[in-house]
Image (cartoon, rainbow, N blue to C red):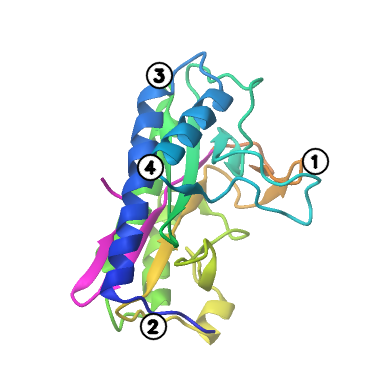
Amino acid sequence: MAITLRSRREIELMRRAGAIVADVLSQLQEFAEPGVTTAQLDSIALQMTADAGAEALFKGVRNPHARIPFPGAICTSINEQVVHGIPSENTKLKHGDILSIDFGVRVDGYCGDAAVTIAIDEISEDKRRLMDVTKHVLGIAIAKARPDVKWSQIAAQMQDYAESAGFSIVRDFVGHGIGRKMHEEPRVPNFVSDELLADDIVLTEGMVLAVEPMINAGSNAVRTLKNGWTVVTKDNKYSAHFEHTIAIVQNGCEVLTVK
């Protein structure tokens, strides 16, 4: 696989994109409450993106399985929805929901991508635990990522933590390299597979990765709704999703999608 290593200058440009992503996600978390529609959240993201002089990465993306390009700037996935939930005026947030918001921008030719799962008002203890475990799994990757480490070693720790907590890691969707395009090489799984072991990723200074564990309360099996975009758990149990764009640097990694 051809993995592009980024210069310090390029990483700093990606940090600017990442800061915009972080700012938008922070604002959306403040605004998300019962009664708010996911379309309203999307409008805020679009306006903030325009104000920052950036381009919303997801809006207009095409998918051979969907009749229409993705219509939103953000993905809004609620409860059993795993990823690629479509913002809608007909979808109001409710007390007790968990909402995953995925968002990315390009600015000055470079991209940033991140996701958070947030609680809408008070949520059940099982939902809170799922969110905490998913966020911790992302934290494992950030803590362990450094030059000369094999990704399979990190993925094994991510998988072990999630599964020892009684949850399952989604296998149909994985993280990815990121740079001038939203999706670049390599594929960055959150679990160990024969495919990964056969062609492991040795982390190298200058790699920039979007690491994004998606963890389900039940089975890891998922399906796509008729709209061709929204992915849900097959058993209708809850799912959580956290993501950061990270750059591999000399002594570890730097998180680029922070304010």
Residue 65 location in percent, x, y? 79, 53
Q: Amino acid at mark 4?
A: Ala
Using the numbered discs, state the Cα–Cα distance from disc 4 to disc 3 in whole angstroms. 29 Å
Using the numbered discs, state the Cα–Cα distance from disc 1 to disc 2 in whole angstroms. 38 Å
- Which residue is drawn at the image coordinates 56% and 32% (left, top)? 79
Work out whether residue 257 can be spotted. Answer: no
Q: First in sequence: mark 1 or mark 3?
A: 3
Q: Amino acid at mark 3?
A: Asp
Q: Secondary structure at mark 2?
A: loop
Q: Which residues are magenta?
A: 239-259
Left or right relative to 60: residue 109: left
Q: Secondary structure at mark 1?
A: loop
Left or right relative to 66: residue 6: left
Work out whether residue 142 can be spotted. Answer: yes
Residue wearing tag 3: 121
Judged by depth in the image, the label closer to the viewer, 4 or 3, is 4
Q: First in sequence: mark 1 or mark 2?
A: 2
Residue wearing tag 1: 226
Towards the viewer: 204 or 241: 204
The image quadrant of residue 77 is: top right
Q: Amino acid at mark 1?
A: Lys
